[in-house]
């Protein structure tokens, strides 16, 4: 029996939503946090900067196919000149609202709090003198303006770098007319500089680096007159494309590829709103872009860099109250974690509970003479020195250490290459995964001698081994000594290292082998249950839902009578609440203080419940082009806890939730007021829940 409804089925004919517009809609929801009056002021600025950073990545990863289609004046439904125009209109609208919010709302509010970005026209004589001295001392020695002529062609401009284009009059030193110059600004220079303030009172005054350079442009061209000028910034396609089948050394190939990433195909050009059309047209011609790719902005060309102001201001009163994660309820504060895991599995809900349990388990393993081996996957760990130190100490103590480092983690390639080289340098066995697949599974496996037998202890997670993001993302950590589950984990490590056929899995579902098929089977089983008249339920919580087979299967299940709730933070292509098509399917997105990152898949047929946690989203890349794992939560108490903390609160969030309507637009969820008439935040409820003292 086919798991996917046949083409004649009504579900197969339903047009899906556009993925890229769904990504932009997510950024609109993030932008809403910058607009909210109930959010602390500097946090509003942070959300504004996050949107800018997200848009940078959007152009770096998603725009190239649209640009190619627009250039060919043809394409398919997803990538065509019309789709590029619609996408461009949506991004331009969002960017215009960003700058309007910053200029008209956030900047005046910051000034009322004593935090001011001082423009050149607002600086007094003393401040201008200090800025001039700073320019001469710190900036000018690093600038090398290029006047364009046949011997000095348009220079290579790096991705997302700050630059100036300057129109000159008069003759150069050789009596020639070269009227265009480019000033490239090195990345090493800070984009915001704090002004000294000798006046009493706690104030923060800063100047933008672009303003400092703008005020001294004429000094860079002695003997010439500066006419029109503008700052500009180009965003380039930056997704590395390495043919793993054709390279002998993936690490070397990636490191070489990183050198060229900054100079890929141009995708977007940002200039000052006042930029002379002749200058902007010249830049568009140089970067081979159309007018649709031009963004005239009323402020700095990179709003994301204003995040530095949050640290410079040093104003805790304008930030969220500091969140201190609780020690996980499943582990004793003191005592052996191994001993506790022999009693049963432990679930840790981050960031409400502390990620510290993960390095604590590894620390115990490192210092335990009975531990023989440690195996771990690394995807996005940041530059955490503690984790590296523990692995180094494990090698020094004679334990077998194998680390699967995913070199192709987008925009973390360089950090992971450095990790691989350091780990190899200390004697660990480093594996780069499977050719053609990214290793996205999050696993830590410890093998320990106990008497005459070996026992395995495992950790699985929906999120990365990154202490910094573990304080900012919601994730589930699952600790276990279950023999079947840990044996499956070992077989996955063996498969990755030895490229051998994956052994039969008793508990784990592994992509790209079983996971998509298993999810399709479970969705189909719920559809069959509903068709037979039994109450059936599906709840999926994920970051994205874009896999067409899974989407079609969900639509079919909904049409059979299954009640389906999808809590999808980001891109979702499933059209919800369409009369006669998807009436039984609700889609919500929760955007809160913490980035929602847990993946939970729940299925219920009558009284029979199945619940899985996973490293994978319901995207084709996760299901077919990555090594991912999903695992069942069979312990009734732990399963109920996941339901109570990761599903129910989010289905009733009336503060941070958005509902996808039949028109494909997201609106604030308005159906979730509590008994007291108040709207509640799932995340805030979880903060309060875990802040309560633990009973003895």
Image (spheres, rainbow, N blue to C red):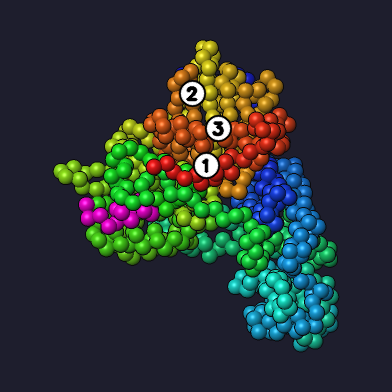
Q: Residue at x 72, y 82 (%)?
A: 130
Residue 609: image x %, image y %?
A: 45, 25
Q: CA distance from mark 1 to mark 3?
A: 14 Å
Residue 673: image x %, image y %?
A: 67, 33
Residue 626: image x %, image y %?
A: 46, 43
Magenta stretch, overall SS: helix
- Viewer can see residue 227: yes
Q: Which residue is mark 1?
A: 689
Q: Which residue is mark 3?
A: 648
Which of 245 and 255 lies nearest the eye of the viewer? Answer: 255
Q: Quadrant of residue 457?
A: top left
Label 3: how many Cα within 10 Å (few below 14, some 14–19, many 20+): few
Of all residues, the one furthest to the left in this rendering is 452
Cβ atoms at labels 1 and 2 below 8 Å apart? no
Foreground mark, 1 or 3, reads 1
Q: Residue at x 71, y 29 (%)?
A: 662
Q: Residue at x 34, y 44 (%)?
A: 458
Q: Is residue 444 left or right of residue 281?
A: left
- Viewer can see residue 462: no
Cβ atoms at labels 3 and 2 below 8 Å apart? no
User: Mark 3 or mark 2, which has the lower sequence index?
Assistant: 2
Residue 496: image x %, image y %?
A: 35, 46
Of all residues, the one furthest to the top in this rendering is 532
User: Mark 1 or mark 3, which has the lower sequence index?
Assistant: 3
User: Mark 1 or mark 2, which has the lower sequence index?
Assistant: 2
Residue 604 shows which numbered tag?
2
Residue range highlighted in magenta: 358-370
* Magenta-span inclusion, residue 285: no
Of all residues, the one furthest to the front in this rendering is 696
């Amino acid at each position: 029996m086919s798991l996917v409804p046949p083409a004649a089925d009504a579900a197969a004919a339903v047009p899906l939503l556009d993925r890229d517009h769904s990504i932009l809609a997510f950024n609109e929801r993030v932008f809403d946090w910058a607009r909210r009056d109930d959010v602390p002021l500097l946090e509003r600025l942070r959300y504004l900067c996050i949107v800018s950073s997200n848009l940078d990545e959007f152009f770096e990863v998603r725009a190239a196919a649209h640009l190619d289609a627009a250039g060919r004046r043809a394409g398919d439904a997803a990538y065509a000149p019309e789709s590029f125009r619609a996408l461009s209109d949506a991004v331009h609208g969002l960017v215009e609202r960003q700058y309007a919010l910053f200029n008209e709302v956030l900047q005046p509010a910051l000034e009322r709090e004593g935090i001011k970005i001082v423009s050149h026209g607002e600086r007094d004589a003393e401040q201008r003198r200090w800025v001039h001295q700073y320019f001469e001392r710190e900036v000018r020695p690093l600038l090398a303006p290029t006047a364009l002529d046949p011997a000095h062609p348009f220079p290579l401009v790096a991705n997302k770098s700050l630059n100036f284009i300057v129109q000159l009059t008069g003759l150069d030193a050789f009596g020639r007319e070269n009227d265009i110059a480019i000033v490239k600004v090195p990345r090493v220079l800070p984009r915001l500089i704090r002004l000294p303030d000798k006046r009493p009172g706690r104030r923060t005054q800063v100047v933008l680096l672009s303003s400092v350079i703008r005020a001294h442009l004429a000094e860079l061209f002695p003997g010439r007159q500066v006419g029109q000028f503008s700052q500009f910034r180009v965003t380039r396609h930056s997704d590395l494309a390495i043919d793993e089948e054709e390279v002998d050394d993936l690490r070397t190939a990636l490191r070489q590829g990183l050198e060229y990433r900054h100079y890929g195909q141009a995708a977007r050009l940002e200039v000052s709103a006042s930029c002379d059309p002749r200058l902007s047209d010249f830049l568009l011609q140089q970067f081979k872009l159309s007018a649709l790719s031009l963004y005239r902005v009323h402020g700095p060309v990179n709003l994301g860099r204003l995040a530095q102001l949050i640290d410079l201001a040093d104003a805790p009163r304008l930030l969220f109250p500091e969140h201190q994660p609780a020690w996980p309820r499943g582990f004793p504060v003191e005592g052996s974690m191994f001993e506790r895991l022999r009693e049963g599995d432990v679930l840790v809900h981050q960031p409400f509970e502390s990620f510290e349990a993960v390095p604590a388990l590894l620390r115990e393993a490192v210092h335990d003479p009975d531990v023989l081996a440690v195996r771990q996957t690394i995807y996005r760990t940041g530059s955490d020195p503690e984790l590296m130190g523990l692995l180094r100490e494990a090698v020094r103590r004679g334990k077998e250490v194998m680390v699967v480092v995913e070199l192709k983690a987008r925009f973390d390639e360089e950090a992971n290459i450095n990790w691989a080289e350091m780990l190899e340098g200390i004697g660990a066995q480093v594996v780069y995964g499977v050719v053609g697949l990214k290793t996205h599974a999050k696993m830590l496996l410890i093998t320990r001698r106990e008497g005459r037998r070996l026992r395995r202890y495992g950790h699985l997670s929906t999120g990365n081994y990154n202490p910094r993001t573990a304080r900012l993302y919601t994730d589930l950590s699952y600790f276990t000594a279950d023999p079947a589950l840990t044996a499956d984990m070992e077989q996955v490590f063996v498969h990755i290292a030895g490229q051998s056929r994956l052994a039969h899995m008793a508990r784990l579902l592994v992509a790209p082998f079983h996971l998509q098929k298993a999810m399709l089977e479970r969705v189909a089983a719920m559809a069959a249950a509903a068709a037979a008249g039994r109450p059936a339920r599906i709840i999926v919580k994920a970051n994205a839902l874009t896999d067409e087979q899974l989407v079609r299967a969900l639509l079919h299940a909904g049409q059979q009578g299954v009640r389906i709730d999808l809590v999808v933070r980001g891109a979702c292509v499933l059209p919800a609440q369409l009369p006669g098509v998807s009436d039984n399917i609700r889609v919500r997105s929760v955007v809160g203080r913490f980035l929602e990152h847990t993946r939970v898949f729940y299925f219920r047929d009558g009284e029979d419940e199945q619940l899985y946690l996973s490293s994978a989203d319901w995207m084709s890349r996760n299901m077919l082009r990555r090594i991912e794992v999903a695992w069942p939560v069979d312990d009734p108490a732990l399963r109920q806890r996941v339901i109570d903390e990761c599903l129910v609160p989010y289905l009733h969030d009336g503060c941070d939730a958005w509902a996808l309507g039949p028109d494909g637009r997201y609106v604030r969820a308005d159906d979730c007021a509590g008994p007291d008439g108040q709207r509640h935040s799932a995340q805030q409820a979880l903060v309060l829940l875990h802040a309560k003292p633990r009973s003895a």
